[in-house]
Image: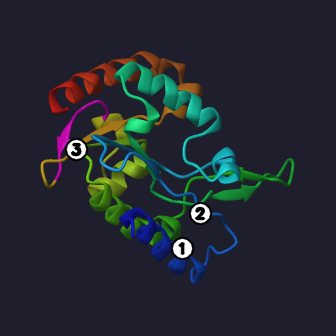
Amino acid sequence: MNKQIEFQEKLTQNFKNSNFTKKTLVFGEGADTPVLMMIGEAPGGDEEKQGRPFVGKAGKNLSSFLEVIGLQREEIYITNVVKLRPTKDSPKTGKAVNRPPSKEEISFFLPYLKEEIQLISPKVIVTLGNVPLKAVTDDKGITIGDVHGKPYSLEQTRVLFPLYHPAAIIYNRGLTNIYQQDLLVLKELLRGIK
């Protein structure tokens, strides 16, 4: 049996016995042996509906990101730290809106993320934002503002490349040039690894 399917079945089984059973799981997807694995924080509304990571607005951001670094979506593997949509009720509308993942959600999914990294075995891990950065490094004090755009060595000759979350540019236009510069550094890094 495919190891990714085994992994998903195990997670699904344990998920059924968790506090999150009313939520929809959104698994990672992509190439079986990619050079690059991209890790986001958690799925949003579009991802929850489609059951796929990085679709909708996030998918558009991802497409332009990949265009800059010269890769196709099919060539990479994409996942999230938390594999369900963290929500709260909006006081204005009463409808579910996104919120940052809770400590409980992160601690439940973190062992699965680590297993997923070993299973996919990428050469480069790109973290998008603080939550995945802290999850991959096990460093609660690290912040994306301090380390974005700088490659770090991880175990097994793996390289970590932290980036701001693409959505950060929507809320802070001042990050646009910084983000573009970081992507060009990543492109050069990948050129040397492929």
Q: Is 51 drawn above or below residue 70 in the view shown?
A: below
Tell me the quarter of the picture where residue 160 sits: top left
Residue 168, position as x, y percentages in the image: 52, 32
**Magenta region, residue range:** 148-154
Mark closest to the chain's N terminus, 3 or 1: 1
Residue 27, position as x, y percentages in the image: 52, 58
Q: Are marks 2 and 1 in contact (CB under 8 Å)?
A: yes
Residue 5, position as x, y percentages in the image: 45, 66
Spatial CA span between label 2 and label 1: 8 Å
Residue lying farthest left? Answer: 157
154 lies left or right of 131: left
The residue tagged 1 is: 12
Tell me the quarter of the picture where residue 164 sits: top left
User: What quarter of the picture does the N terminus occupy?
Assistant: bottom left
Q: Amino acid at mark 2?
A: Leu
The residue tagged 3 is: 123
